[in-house]
Image (cartoon, helix red, strand yellow):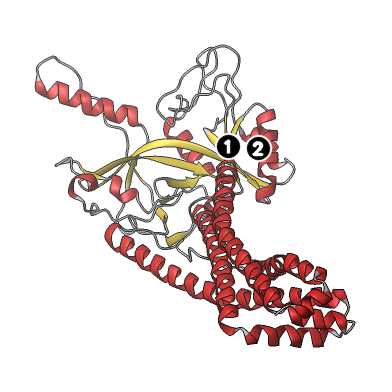
Amino acid sequence: MKFGDLLNLAVSNLKRRKLRTFLTVLGVIIGTASIIVMVSLGIGQSELQMELISSSTSLTTISVYGGSSGYMYSMGGGSSASSGDEPLYITDETIEQFKNLPYATGASPILNYYVIAKQGVYESSFNLAGVSHDYLEQIPLSEGKVPEKGSSQLSLIYGNMIRRDFTNSKTNEGYWDTGEEPDVDLINKPMFIIFDRDKYYQSQSNNQDSGSGDDGAQPVTPPKKYIVPTAGIVKGGPMDWNQYSYNVYCDVDALKTQLKTIFRKNPIPGQPTNKKGKPYNYFIYDEAEVYADDMEHVMEIQNRITEMGFQANSNVEWVQSSQKQMQAQQAVLGGIGAVSLLVAAIGIANTMMMSIYERTKEIGVMKVLGCDMNNIRDMFLLESGFIGLMGGIAGIAVSYAISKIINVLYLKQQMEQAAMGGYDMSATGDISRIPPWLILLALIFAILIGMLAGFFPAKRAMKLSALSAIRNE
């Protein structure tokens, strides 16, 4: 018997029992839709998390810190001598070594230095991060532009949340007290920067003490204030967090030139000293960033840096751990959907078994007429497989509809949260995502489940005695 004949016979047999076929196919529809929707939710959550991480930070960046033997993370808070063995510092020479590592596309030093900023009655203390020009070019800006490479003029790129750190020096109130951003213009008004914080605080304290009594204390001259122009502002609103939101950035060479000009031969606050208490004749960086060509090579570069004696970490470590959790969650969701498809398989097996009992005489006639046993088996397998095919196709359509509804409801929820609490919508997407491979896999799975469910009934049909089948009423 030809395959086309077997197929026509299988379809006609299913049509004769329309209600039973419909109910069996309905079970496959529910099972297929369940497994697709469940897996799509797991995929959507995993991809959303990756998009959120990528939008706020880099997945190919490795943060490097000095060796643990004596590293001091100071941020301009005063110099200190190391004890014991000479600590492993990050210098310009170290940066060049990082750049030459396999799979590394570049490296940037980070010189952190705390300054005081003043504009009118508003005052703030923030971290000024001196970085390479390549680093500055990675920062997304809403206003201004990155300073020209090689420029010795110090100019600043402000984080989009930095305004909230300013307080009114007369009322001592700021954003966290009033709920409103201070009236600080980072672009059009001059910003005065004080680099010698120690001298500034000494002058404030000394002047207050000398004005309150007759102790004869001489007032301390306040340090010089410098007008530093603004190069740009990080893209984003006051509530849009990203990795650049809270810092102020500048070119590291321009910052070093400025610090040398201000402190001349005096020790620069925050720079370590040797065992004799003298400053080094070169700058020592608080940290560095090394850039990998691909996320797959991050851990290899990180391990090499660790072998050099430095401390290193990256977001890839956390992402890999998070992905394992997501994969486990996705497996659980897929398992829940697979249970529905298993129930549908039991329904298919039941339908095919009942079909055999009802068509026993028909099977006996086919055997007496000399029909090949394999044809009888294939006929029942085609019927069960066709049930799986119809249920799979319809289940795919239903899963798309359910996924669409879930995504609409999720988007509505995110918009409500954004309206209430300033939620960042830039990384928001569909929570249910159905890739093409999932559709193909679900369809093949539904057909295989149908055929497997019909296998044992088909084997039973092959084993029926022809004479007994003919005499059966």
Q: Secondary structure at mark 2?
A: helix
Where, by quadrant of the figure, is residue 340 drawn? Answer: bottom right
On residue 313, the disc is 1
Of residues 35 and 465, which is closer to you in this image?
A: 465
* Number of numbered discs visible in the structure rendering: 2
Q: Is residue 7 above or below residue 203?
A: below
Left or right? Give the position of 230 relative to 403: left
On residue 302, the disc is 2
Of residues 371 and 34, which is closer to you in this image?
A: 371
Left or right? Give the position of 79 relative to 191: right
- Whether label 2 touches label 1, CB < 8 Å: yes
N-terminal-most mark, 2 or 1 = 2
The answer to whether residue 396 of the structure is visible from this angle is no
Left or right? Give the position of 303 relative to 208: right
Q: Residues within 10 Å of mark 2 (few under 14, many from 20)?
A: many
Where, by quadrant of the figure, is residue 221 drawn? Answer: top left
Q: Residue at x 87, y 82 (%)?
A: 368
Q: Position of residue 414 (x, y in %)?
A: 37, 63
Q: Residue at x 38, y 48 (%)?
A: 228
Where, by quadrant of the figure, is residue 17 drawn? Answer: bottom right
Q: Position of residue 252 (x, y in %)?
A: 52, 42
Q: Residue at x 55, y 31 (%)?
A: 283
Q: Position of residue 212 (x, y in %)?
A: 10, 22
For the residues marked 2 and 1, what is the alpha-carbon distance in whole angstroms?
7 Å
On residue 116, the disc is none
Q: Position of residue 176 (x, y in %)?
A: 23, 45
The amino acid type, in three-letter code, at marker 2 is: Gln
Q: Residues within 10 Å of mark 1 (few under 14, many from 20)?
A: some
Q: Quadrant of the C terminus?
A: bottom right
Q: Secondary structure at mark 1?
A: strand
The amino acid type, in three-letter code, at marker 1 is: Asn
